[in-house]
Amino acid sequence: MHKSRFLWALCLPAACLSQSFSGETFDEELAIRALPDGKVASRFEFSTLLHGASPRNPRNLSSEDDSQHYTLFPLALGQVLRRYAVTELHLTLNAGKWNYDRWGYPDEPDVATGASMWTWMAEGSPIPRHSVDARWRDLRNALAGLFCASLASLDEQRTTSPVLAFVPQGALPAWPQTEPHALRHASLPSEHVCTENLTPFLKLLPCKSRAGLARLLNPHRLLDADWHGMGLHVSWLPEEGVRVRLTFQSVTDPLRAGNTRDWSLSSLFDRKIETACPVAASSRVVVTLPTDESYSIRPEPSFVGQGRGIFDLASQPLPLDVGLHWPTAFQYTTLPTAQSPLSVRRTLHGSSQDHSTLAVSIKNAGPAVVRVAYLETLPWIVHLYLHTLELSVDGVSRADVLHDLSYTAPIPHGRAAALEAVLDLPPNSTVSLRLGVGRAFLQYGEHPPDAQRGWELPGAVVVVLPEHPGNDSQRRIYTSALLVDPATPDFSMPYNVIIFSCSLVAFIFGSVFNGLTRRFVVIAAGPRAE
Amino acid sequence: MPPHVHPEGTTLRDPSKLFYQLDFNRRLIIASYWVVIIAAIPLWWHFTSIERLSLPTSQVHSQAANQLRFPVQIQLENIQDASLPASLQQLLDDRIQRSPQAWKGLDVRVRNQNDANKPGDLFTVTANDNIPLASQRDLMYPIRPGTLSMLADALSILLVPPTDTHRVAQYSPRYRLAFTLLNEDAAAGKSISGWDISGAISRHLSPILNGLSVLHNFTIESQVQFHAPLAFSPLSLPDGYGITPEDLTVFVNSAEWSLSSSVSNDPVLHFVIFIPSASRRPLQILDSRGSPSPSSAFLLPQWGGIIIYNPPPEQESHAPLPQSALNSIFSTFATQLLALLGVPNLPPDVQTDAPVLTGWQLDALLRRRALENAEGAQDTLKSIVKLVDQIENMPVGQDVKGDVQDSLTALDQMYAYSSTSLNSTLHQSADALTLASRAFFNPGMLALLYFPAEHKYAVYTPLFASAMIPMIATAVREIRAWRKQRREAASAAAQ
């Protein structure tokens, strides 16, 4: 019986992806909540579900794929997913550092600075260009073209396959005769997110930015926010189909304009919702309501429950401009209370250009032991000296907090390093981890543009491991990126350098040569003339 | 001669007797420097030279002079007058002489009844008294001495159909057909929410695509867009809106319409249904005099076809495309597809009973595509050879050379097939063109283009000039001293 179900799953994608509009739904939601420090976090989520579809089996990559007919699902993305047989894909482009201590956990967990991408793909046929690594490379290039981002720089030198940190959000199909799925992860903290990335993002939406909630995605306001980031998440839900979620998160500061926390859609985005997107199955604005203060919200929400006010665009009069007003002025608290029980600091010490120390401290403010996985992915230009690993809890050296450690050594000019450590964080204490770091000497062509600026190391990831295995809800904390400056030559005046060094070499050569070949004679000076 | 004497009278060692001051040793030192430099020259040459493999130039030129020829035989059946084949041959020869360019590559021979089997594709013309009818490779035609000239005209259209080369897309073994339903502004209401694209394709296009499968493979994709603004404002008319012929040239708003992604390099033929916004209906195409034209479809050469569909005013909000409209739109798309792929029309007076294409049309298309490809491949090969000759810094690697040789091989095979199999000829010609283009656009050929010789000298001179001058000066001085010694020794011996 199982066999036949597998076969059914195999022939399903063709049938479902080629069927027309009946099998696609599009939902959109905007969630807005005030943060404890007076800022406002908003999250747009545009979700398209392709009912009954399933990812392509990489075994079938050599054979002709079926025609792709989409109504709401973005064709440009669908083609990329089918062409490279991607089961699950997560791409995020974020600007700034998410402040966990003040803001708590984000609604979308992927908030790594810069570009970050991870996929789950199955190993395909023995043809080299259908291997996971080849498809991962091609996928990066395709998405780089789609999003106008430097994703092509997420090359082998930045790619890692950590085990614990990135579990699939959907399901992974178990195809017969196919190798199990493999993870590829890479991040590029120096990528700057800009309008040029937002424009292609908006083009993937059925109503573009002309109707519905996407109308509020005003680049002038969004890119001015304290923190903003966009994400693309593709996953397969066996009961439903292939789901694409396009998300945009931002943290805006109403206090910047005046001493008030009051916000409205027009103050946050400089736009109102004027028309509904006619093809959206549901379009909602969800506002988290304050719990311990008096406030007024306008207009009246369609539905209030669980501390949230929900505006349904189908029943609200348009244009809609949701606004929240506090009668009392905002009081700055000098000591912001920590919003997440874990707090991570990561720094790089040392003044020399060849050696430094990586210091990480993870504070557990909670009352219970927390088991976390600490993931460090580093480009090969820095390498860790594992024998220098020191672990201490509140300043007392303790090795027993380290539960498990796996390390993928870097290959110079080839592969990135990945360190994955499982740590037990004791309650109400700070675990610090120190590691010696060596820096490589780069070849002339390996320096990035603007070499003097240094290399940005991707942020580490701390994953709170679920207490019971099988519980998929993962909390991830991304630390900020670090800047490392390897020894850099003076690129500014190559000719001067060539001429100076050549002159020196020629001078030394000439002296040695002359000394070896000169003819020495004794000259009689003759009697001194008096 | 006394040794050099110190002014104070102490005797010094003669410096010329020191080990390294001996003439022989000093010359050995100088010579060893030169030996190292001379020995290093081949090494230096090897590491700084550009890999320039020789291309088969003479083969390319001889291949370019070749001309693809297709023998075509016409057999007349069921005729009374035995002199008719000869007269038809005469009429066809006249036409060939009048426009040799159109008949290029074709050897047409009208067979006599008693001719032995000769190579070439055989077409049959059967005399009958009904209307002219073309089926696979046969043509029914009333053959009488009086209609022979009309038959010759019909045959020339069947064998070498006139084509608009600007309209026909360039040959590719695989095309992507991208169907797009564009709503100008769905939020304005009364938009089209979807279409039965799979059904329409299987009804209207699949027979054509199957008929053309010897020439091309097709990948089909479709999407619906709900916001596709125009880059211009249509003209306001008393009873609707109009697009002037000038506006038609900028109708496709590629900045806003994401019509196709770049997931593959195959050429794309676009087929677009444009639904004007509810506030701009009906939208009509105007002719050059400014009056609405009856057609709502137009073709962009080599790009694709566009149809403007105005939904009926009584249509409810967000309904799928009605079946009747879908049928008429897709039959227009089918015509546009045939035009874009260069499928020839039958002569106006000839009917057909073939479902899609007759053998006459398909063969004419195959021959023309093969000729185009062969010419393209020959031109490209000539260009590569010329380019490599002209630019001396251009590297030519093994992959370029291999592609050029493979392309020549494909051309050779194409000639070998030209009298036996039209399909194989086309495939070989397509291979030849693909390989030649790949060689021409090989990125490795650009590597050192912008690293000129002056640049190299500028880098070398500061080191080599200052090192070489003392070496040359010492060598010259030493050679002079040696010759002077020889002369003195000779004159001493003569005395």
Image (cartoon, coloured by chain):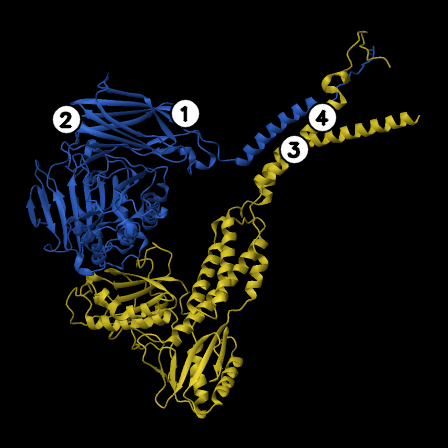
Chain colours: A blue, B yellow
Q: Quadrant of the N terminus of chain B?
A: top right
Provide the secondary structure element on which disc 2 rests: loop
Instruction: Please give left or right for residue A171 compared with residue A136 in the image.
Output: left
Q: Are marks 4 and 1 in contact (CB under 8 Å)?
A: no
Residues at discs 1 and 2 both on one chain: yes
The residue under label 2 is: A366
Residues at discs 3 and 1 both on one chain: no
Query: How far apart in space, not on screen, are marks 3 and 1 (Cα)?
Result: 38 Å
Query: How far apart in space, not on screen, are marks 1 and 2 (Cα)?
Result: 38 Å
The residue under label 1 is: A354
Q: Which mark, by number, is residue B28? A: 4
Query: How far apart in space, not on screen, are marks 3 and 2 (Cα)?
Result: 74 Å
Residues at discs 3 and 2 both on one chain: no
Q: Chain of mark 4?
A: B
Q: Which mark, by number, is residue B37? A: 3
**At label 4, which amino acid type do we have?**
Leu
